Image (tube, rainbow, N blue to C red):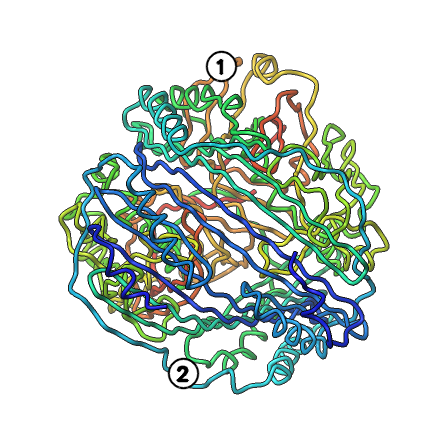
Amino acid sequence: MRNFKNLIKGFKVDEYELFFSNITTDNVSFKDNELKNIEDTISTGYGVRVIKDKHIGFSATNKYEDIKECMKNAIDSTNSTKRVKFSFPETKEFLNIETADVEWPFEERIRLGNKIVEEISKINQDIRLSVDLVKTKKRVEIFNSSGSELSCDIDSYLIVIFAFGFLKTGVFETFKVFHSLKKPPVDKLNLDSIIMLLKQAEQESVIDKGYYEVILSPIASYALMMTFAPHFDGKNVLKKSSPLYDKLNKKIFDEKLFITDNPLCDLANARPFDEEGVVAKPKKIVEKGVLLDFVNNLDTASELNTNPGNATRRSFKNLPAPSFSNFIISPGGNQFNKLLDSTEKAVYVDLVMGTRYNINGDVSVNIGLGYVIENGKFKGRIKNAMLAGNLYELFSNIKWISSDTEEIGSASIPFICLNNVSIVKK
Amino acid sequence: MDFLKLVQKIGEEYAEIHFEERKSLSIDFEGKDIENISQVTEYGGNARVFSNGNWGFANFIKPDESENALHKAIRIVKLLPQKSDKIYKSSPIRFNYKDELKFNLQNLSLNEKVDLLKKLYSILTASPKIIHTRINYSELELTKYYFSNEGSQIVQSFCYNSLILSATSKDGENLQEATDRITDRKGEIFEKSEELAHKVRDEAIELLSAQVPEGGVYDVILDQEMAGVFIHEAFGHLSEADFQYKNPALLNKFQLGTLIGAEFLNAVDDGTIKGEFGFFSYDDEGIPSSKTYLIKEGKLSSRLHSRVTAETMGEKPTGNARAQNYTFQPIVRMSCTYIEPTNTTKEELFDSIKRGIYVVGTKGGETGLEQFTFIAKKGYLIENGKKIKLLRNLTLSGNVFETLKNINGIANDLKFSGGYCGKFTQYQFVSTGSPHISIKNVIIGGI
């Protein structure tokens, strides 16, 4: 890190923190089944926080020469901002994240992208594929008045496949994500589920409005869970604008549900320390359906008298806010295929549309891609259907959770079967 | 750094350099506490080169890195196999623009802005039923520079201001939330802010007594905000030529001249409306913004284009290539998208509904191109033209082509809202607008 100490000389503050991030990305991108682009991008910048007379200030810039101006702006803002109880942490040691900077030549990515397109489009010529093969290098440095001088470099490799098309039965869309910190995730690449869903979407099935067992794909579960992720945010808990604020150690979900935040595992948001310099540790959030903890940054943790460690910045321009790093739902006991075999009648939901945060956890979403399951078999897709309910009620009535999980960038999610879900149909 | 001289040295078919300077302020209240006051300055640019049917792209931070980025973009484009895409060429343009402000918010000190926002907090919390509030205020001053090897130099300075107010109400275990927003390009943002605070507070309290609708198929009336988002999300994105031009199935569905709605249905995208959040003079490829009829007299009329989609499809460019910032390439985006009004009144629309739902406001929506889902702020059950019951958790869903055909009334009360649109991980400033409209047979989600 450059000589920040010299830049901040002469500024009278009680505490300071400099956050630096530099992210370089190169992306080989396919669209509509052909190679579209190769993009090389860089984003770099500095976020400055100060604490003066217990008030916190913030400013940011991507010009190193403007850091002094940032300090002035941050100090000015302390005249109006709230009082805080926390101090910047002194962090000397942390576990390293295993990551590797491996060559992933453009030519190799182009070949792989072409192969993915060929494999799927030979099933159906009307399918249009977008494929992104991305390598990212992220460097983070945190330097604060408590003596922390931290830096880490995280490499990340991602393959994102989005399949879209107009079939006889209507619009088909699904996507898959493959990720690794150590090398291009070519050995994780598996197109079987996309191919299966595509084949099964060639015929249409009809269901009536009513209550059904609903099997959620990992992506659908994740999308629904993220609509009420803010309920676990320490900030909302503090303000009592989360319905969970008084539910600590109480049962909020089915006992089959275990949720962990784990910044140390090989998923997209792995990091050795959070974005305030607090050492990264796994945190149990829900165990056997019981709420054990919330996600907190230094500020909310100091107010709630609990542990921080979940601070994430959207970019150097943003303040660190409580957020899940890697969101893990623990797998269940049996494989998905075996559980499916024993399913008499259900609706399989691969993709949901229209998810939005709701303060109560109420949800009403379009089934973007869904199928009828009868006697363990896919019996065709359904159209113009919505599922509705309250997510706490829905996830309190879980029939099963599969042992197989899918990694979706920064999440690891199994298949989940819910009992008694309201489906509305045209 | 003489960007124009630099880019004009490039002998490829087309090359451009962008550079931008941003200065932003945001003030965030959580309850009575000012969580954050953040002032951010940022600059950066990018180089794009078009050759053999392909784009190469690289961005840079400091101006003296631009030459490197340009050469990187050239190296990248040479790696790509030849494609049949073509690019529209234009004559050189020299243009300068700056948003006309009714009031310059920079003339208010930080403390004055904080005091104005504190006043809004006191309005929001003037009821014991309100347990929590949020206020997000932001200003952005953005200057964008565009240079091309056609010899163009375009400088545009914009200001984008926004105020979002949220209030959470509580009655026993029942928690409800109301949120609303003002956007502004002229510095007038505080003029309507108190009215907004009253509205948000009252709506949060009102929602405590709202009921969840029974899911099913209804005749609906959409208010201007929801109808504006509908035409933008459900239809506007389909009109973006970068979705269509390599997709024969979508092109087939979107044949110009196809009848998709009633004769009185006209939908427009217009980037030339000064003062609207989605306004700009030139897009990010140096093409002037324009008024484009997407639907005219019920028929598909035009698409929205970039230089490449226009030339490749043999159509005129429309000036709709826009990038979120210098780390992104421009893609086809809407600007100000709206349904044109007719002579029918809102009252006449209501009178035509025996039993239906009046959908008010929107918390957002999503489209899977043909399918859409939108979430309303609230609604009312209508019987015999009258609102009889307040509703919450209202979600609309459907197939866009079927729904457009089912629009059976458009009122005369056009109104615009400013906001943000997401596409392929990029966000963009847009406006949406519409009068009240009535639609038959819409799926409403409920319990």
Quarter of the C terminus of chain A within the rendering = top left
Residue B304 in sight in this render: no
- Label 1, residues with CA under 10 Å away: few <14, some 14-19, many ≥20: some
* Residue B168 placement (x, y as % from top left): 66, 62
Q: Residue at x 71, y 42 (%)?
A: A272
* Residue B422 placement (x, y as % from top left): 43, 52
Secondary structure under badge 1?
strand
The residue at the far right in this view is: A305
- Comparing B125 with A230, the one in front is A230
* Residue A17 placement (x, y as % from top left): 72, 62
Q: Is residue B78 left or right of residue A309?
A: left
* Residue A3 placement (x, y as % from top left): 67, 63
Q: Residue at x 64, y 46 (%)?
A: A228
Disc 2 residue type (three-letter)? Leu
Q: Chain of mark 1?
A: A
Q: Which residue carries the number 1 mark?
A: A377
Q: Which residue carries the number 2 mark?
A: B101
Q: Is residue A172 above or below residue B34?
A: above
Q: Is residue A51 left or right of residue B331?
A: right
